[in-house]
Image (cartoon, coloured by chain):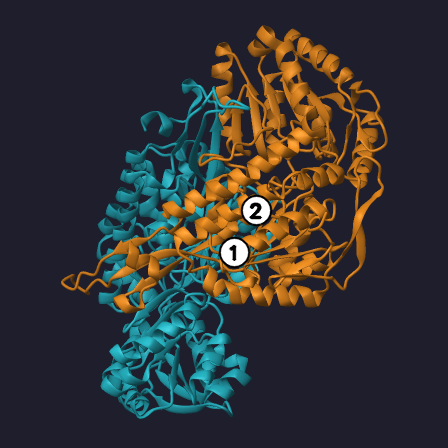
Chain colours: A cyan, B orange
Amino acid sequence: MTMLNGDLLIGGQARRGRGGSFYGIEAATGQNLPVEFAGATVDDVKEASALAWKAFETYRETGLEERAHFLERIATEIEAIGDELIERAMAETGLPRGRLEGERGRTAGQLRLFAKEVREGKFQELRFDPANPERKPAPKPDLKLRNLGVGPVVVFGASNFPLAFSVAGGDTASALAAGCPVIVKAHSAHPGTSELVGRAVQKAVAESGLPVGTFAMLFDTGFEVGQALVADPRVQAVGFTGSRRGGLALMKTASERKQPIPVYAEMSSINPVLLFPNALAQRGEAIGKAFAGSLVLGAGQFCTNPGLIIALECSGLESFKSAAVAALKEAPAQTMLTGGIFKAYCSAVQKLESHSAVKQLVRGPDGADFQGAAALFETDAKSFLAHTELQEEVFGAAGLIVRCMSEAELSDVLDHIEGQLTIALHIDEADVPAAKALVPKLELLAGRLLINGFGTGVEVSPAMVHGGPFPATSDGRSTSVGTLAIYRFLRPVCYQDFPEALLPAPFKKA
Amino acid sequence: MTMLNGDLLIGGQARRGRGGSFYGIEAATGQNLPVEFAGATVDDVKEASALAWKAFETYRETGLEERAHFLERIATEIEAIGDELIERAMAETGLPRGRLEGERGRTAGQLRLFAKEVREGKFQELRFDPANPERKPAPKPDLKLRNLGVGPVVVFGASNFPLAFSVAGGDTASALAAGCPVIVKAHSAHPGTSELVGRAVQKAVAESGLPVGTFAMLFDTGFEVGQALVADPRVQAVGFTGSRRGGLALMKTASERKQPIPVYAEMSSINPVLLFPNALAQRGEAIGKAFAGSLVLGAGQFCTNPGLIIALECSGLESFKSAAVAALKEAPAQTMLTGGIFKAYCSAVQKLESHSAVKQLVRGPDGADFQGAAALFETDAKSFLAHTELQEEVFGAAGLIVRCMSEAELSDVLDHIEGQLTIALHIDEADVPAAKALVPKLELLAGRLLINGFGTGVEVSPAMVHGGPFPATSDGRSTSVGTLAIYRFLRPVCYQDFPEALLPAPFKKA
C-alpha cells in the first residue's frame, strides 16, 4: 500500500485535499478500508482547469506516435500496479477477482486500441482542397481541414466499472486520444482504486514528458466539485456514466454556462429483450436459462443489463419463464457495489413486489448484508402502458416480463419505450419476417440491436455503438465505447490559403 | 405569377393557412408586394411533423442513387422557375440581380454537391467487424455499423440568404442528404421566394415518388410556429441561421423537451481581421481598399462580414485607414433586407457614433429609405476591453478598428474575443513568426482561419468549416456549409450478429 494515501492528483503532484475527508468502504461489510481520503475544493478545481488549459496548447499538438505511446504507457503502468489494484478494487466494489482481472485487461486493451487509432491518424480528418486561381467567376482558395481536440475534458468515474469506465476508462482514453487534457472526478465508491490508477496515469504523463496539466484527479464527497468542474469556463466537454438524475443535473449546468458545452452522459437503459414465438417454441428453456445468466452477471450492475422482456403470450413463453425462474431460484445473492446501490435496489424490488399490476415470479435466495438477490416479475402490456414507473431502470439483477396478447399490443409497447442502449431479439428462421417488420422501429429506439444474444458484454471495437437515444444517453449521435468515441472530443478547423510556414504540423507530414 | 398564392406546403399539397395573414414587403420601398400569405397554426405543425415522421421510415431507406437523383431534381426544379424567382427575390430582399443569380447557382450547386456525397456513400460510415468464434475468453460477435438519419429536421430560413440558406439551402440539402425529412419554417422577409422554391421541392418530391411528408413549408408572422416545431416530439434536430437571441430561444426550447434534441444555430460573429505590421507597411492601402470592399458586400449582411479590425499602432495602419475611409466615403448606401434590419442597423450605428470611447472615421453617403450607409469606427484596446458592448455584432456594413499599443495588448484583446466563424490574418513574409505565435490561440476561437483574405465568400466544398465556438454557432463541432454538414443529421447504429435476411439494405450492397 505504499502508493496509496488519499491525495488529490494535480499539477503532476499528489497533495492533500482541503475538502471533507472520507474513507473507501468495503462493499461486503460496509466497514471503512485503510487510508483516509480528502476531497477537493473549488480552488483545486480552478487550479486543475487552469493547468489543463495550459497543457492543452502543447498536448493537442503532440505527434501521433508520441500520443499513442503515451496511451500505451498508461496501459503498462496500470498493469504494473499488479495485484494491489485488483485487491483494492475487489474490496471497494465487491466484484469478484475474475471480473476485475478481465476489466483490467479491457481497460489496458482499450488504451492500446486508441493508441492504434491515434497512430492511424484517420480521426484527424485531414482534408486537402486545393486552390484554383483560374476558376470563374471567382478564384477558388486553397482550403485545408483538420479535426482538433475540443479542449479540457472532465470525466466522471462510473461506479459500476471501477477500471474500464473510471479514471483511465473509455472516456479518458478517447479524450486523451483526441488531444484533450482530462480532469477526472473520481467516484467515491472506489477511491483507492481511483488513486492507484490515477497515479499510474500521472506517472505516464511524467515519463512521456507531457505538461503536468494533461491529467488531474479530484475527490469529492458530494456534488460541489463535479458541478464546479462542469461550470468552469476552461472545460470544453464532459463524459459521464451514471444515474439519470446525475446526468440531467450536469446537462443543466452545461447548458446554462455562458458558453454551453456538450455533455456525453450515459444514463439509464432497461435494454428490452424481444422474444419471438418460434424461437420460444424451439428453445424457450435455453433462452430462459441464458437470460437468467445475463441478468445476474455482475449482480445486474451493467448499463446493458436486460431489465425488460417483451413477448407474445405463447406456450414457449412458459418454458422460458420456468427455466429463468429455476435458474434465478438458485442464483446466489451477490455483493453490490455500494451500500447506497444495495439499498436502492432493495427498495425498487420491494416497490415491484407490492405493485398491484405486477406479479413476482421468483426471488433468488437471500444473501449476506449488502448482497442483492435476483428477482423476476411479470405484468401485461396494458398494465405496463398504464404505469410508466414500470419503465424505470432498476439497477441490479431484477427483470420484468411484459406479456402481450397481440402483435398490436406488442407494437404499442414498443411505441412507448424510451431510448435504449440495446435491444435484443431472440428469433428463429420462421420469426425473420416478424422481426424484419420491427427493425425499422427498433433502430430508432436503440444504438445497438442484437440477434439471439444479450447486451451484456460490450465489445470494444470499431463497429460498437454504446450510446442511444435519450435518456439512454444525452446525445444519441455518439458512442462511449469503441473507436468512434474519439469523435466526441473533436471539432473541425479550416485553414484557408495558409502558407506552408504557418500550417499546423499534421498537414506537413501528410 | 401563376405559382404563387401564399399557401402553406404540406402533405404534398398547397393549402391556405389558418393563422394570421401577411404580405411580402418590397425591401426598397416598404410597400406590400402582390399575394397575401397566411401563417400556419399549431395544428398544421402537428400535421406536418406527423407526416414527416411517417415519411422518415421510407425516406431514410431510399437507395443512394434515388436520393441523389431527388436532390438533383430539386436543383433542376429551382432552376426551372426561371426569372420569376430572381425578380421576386430582388423585390423582397433588395439584393441585386447578379448576387441573386449567383446565389441561385450556389444553391443548385450545393444540392448537386450533396447528391455526389450521397452517391459516394461515405457518410453511411459502413463498418464491418466480423465474428471470431474462436476468441478466448469469449467468442467475438459479428458487428456492423452504419449511420442513420436522426429523424425529421426543422430548418429555419435565413433572411440574408434567401436561396442558399433558406427553403432549399444548405441545412435542407444536408438534412435531406442524410435521409431526414425536412419541415421548413419560411422566413417572413421573403415569403414569395420561399413559396416558389418550396413548390419546386414539393414537385421534386412528387416526381421522385417519395412520401408526401418528406418536405413541408410553413409560414408564420411570429414565433409560435417555430417554437411549436422545435418542441414537437417527432422533430429530432434543428437547423437555424439568424440572430443570437433567436438561436438561444430555440436552444432553450430544445433543451427543455422531454427528449432534448440538437440545435445547429449559426448566430453571431464579428469575424476579426488581424493586420500585421509588415503587411501594413508594404500594402496598407491595398488591404484597406479590399477591406472596404468586403465590408460593404451585400450591404454587409453576411455572417462572415469583417466587423472588427485588430492592429498594432503603426504608420501602415494609417495608410490602411485612409484607403478604407476613402473607399467607404464613396460607397453607395444599399437597400437592406428588411425595414427591421435597416432600423436595427441605424440604431446600432448611432450607438457607436455617440459612444464615448469610439471615434467615427467615416460614414458613407446617405441613400434612399431603407438603404444602409457604410460606417467605420475606431477605438483603442483598453476601451474595447472595458466596453463589452463593442463586441456585439452590427448586422450591416459597419466596422470597428481596435488599435493596440503593444503585442501584449493585442493578445489581451484576443483573450476576450468570443467564438467566431472566421478570423483573417493579413501578413507578409516578415510577419510569419508573429502570426505563427498567434495561430494556436486563433484556432480555438474560430472555425476558419484565413490568410490575406476576408471571410466573405464561403466556398461550398469538402474542407469548408462554416461553424465555430459559441456564440458563433451553438455547436462548434459542426459546420453548416460544405459536405461535412451532413454529419449533423446522422447517428450511428450497431447491428450485432444480424443474419443476412435481417440486415438493412446498405450492408448487402456493400
- Residue B249 against residue A367 in the figure, above or below: above
User: Where's the C terminus of chain A, which quadrant?
Assistant: top left
In x, y percent, where is residue A204? Answer: 30, 41
In x, y percent, where is residue A493? Answer: 48, 35
Name the quadrant containing residue A340.
bottom left
- Left or right? Give the position of A348 relative to B282: left
- Left or right? Give the position of A371 relative to A154: left
Label 2 SS: helix
| Structural crowding at the residue carrying mark 1, measured as other residues with C-alpha within 10 Å and reported as few (<14), some (14–19) or many (≥20) | few
In x, y percent, where is residue A345? Answer: 43, 78
Whether residue B333 is visible, yes or no, is: yes
Nearest the viewer among B482 and A228 is: B482
The mark that comes first in sequence, 2 or 1, is 2
Residue type (three-letter) at the residue carrying disc 2: Glu
User: Where's the N terminus of chain A, which quadrant?
Assistant: bottom left
Gap between marks 2 and 1 measured at Cα:
10 Å
Label 1 SS: helix
Are both tags, 2 and 1, on one chain?
Answer: yes
Residue for badge 1: B207
- Residue B334 against residue B80 in the figure, above or below: above
- Residue A29 against residue A185 in the figure, above or below: below
For the point 18% across and 61% down, which residue is it? B132
Whether residue A1 is visible, yes or no, is: no
Do the residues bearing badges 2 and 1 touch, measured as CB atoms within 8 Å? Answer: yes
- Left or right? Give the position of B160 relative to B432: right
Residue found farthest to the front:
B2
Chain to which mark 1 belongs: B
Q: Which mark is residue B77?
A: 2
